[in-house]
């Protein structure tokens, strides 16, 4: 078995590099919009914006924020060697921004009646991390 395959023959788990600054700013109470403006590649900041918008009933805004975080996360995954499939473990904290954005995109897609996008994103989340799917609901 090569170092690039897991025991089931699939790709190895992808672990994004740590970017502690946005996470620390968000944990310290800095507004998500300010963090996204300072660190626009941070999926976590966009996912937080998506959550905040969804909680206040701004579903389309939530969808847009989540989609931005999702695409920023895809870019980061590709830079980390991800080939379009395989595990993205929730247990690796730097992956959580992407996984939260993916969950937020599924949630907002369902809320606006975009069923195919909801199903695609939900399946992608489960395939990436069963733990994330369970944790995020």
Image (spheres, rainbow, N blue to C red):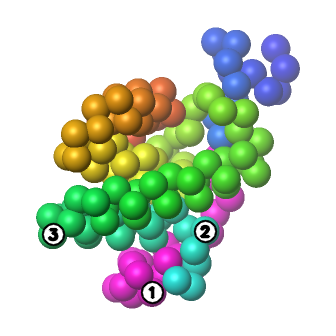
Q: Quadrant of the C terminus?
A: top left
Element at label 1: helix
Where are the magenta residues, as a range?
15-36
Residue at image mark 2 = 41
Q: Residue at x 66, y 33 (%)?
A: 84
Establish if 12 lies above or below 56.
above
Instruction: Name the image quarter holding residue 51.
Output: bottom left
Numbered disc 3: secondary structure = loop
Q: Quadrant of the N terminus?
A: top right
Name the residue carrying label 3. 56
- Residue in the picture at 70% in, 25% down: 11
Q: Residues within 10 Å of mark 2 (few under 14, many from 20)?
A: many
3 lies left or right of 106: right
Q: Looking at this view, is 113 or 72 the one in front?
A: 113
List the residue tagged with mark 1.
Answer: 34
Residue 24 painted magenta: yes
Q: Residues within 10 Å of mark 1 (few under 14, many from 20)?
A: some
- Residue 48, percent from left and from top: 36, 67
């Amino acid at each position: 078995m090569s170092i690039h395959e897991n025991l089931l023959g699939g790709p190895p788990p992808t672990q994004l590099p740590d970017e502690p600054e946005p996470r620390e700013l968000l944990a310290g109470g800095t507004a998500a919009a300010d963090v996204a403006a300072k660190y626009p590649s941070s999926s976590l900041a966009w996912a937080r914006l998506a959550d905040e918008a969804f909680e206040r009933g701004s579903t389309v805004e939530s969808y847009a924020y989540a989609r931005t975080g999702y695409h920023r996360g895809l870019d980061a995954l590709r830079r980390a060697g991800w080939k379009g499939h395989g595990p993205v473990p929730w247990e690796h904290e730097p992956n959580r921004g992407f996984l939260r954005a993916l969950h937020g995109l599924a949630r907002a897609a369902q809320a606006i009646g975009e069923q195919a996008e909801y199903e695609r994103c939900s399946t992608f989340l489960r395939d990436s991390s069963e733990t994330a799917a369970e944790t995020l609901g």
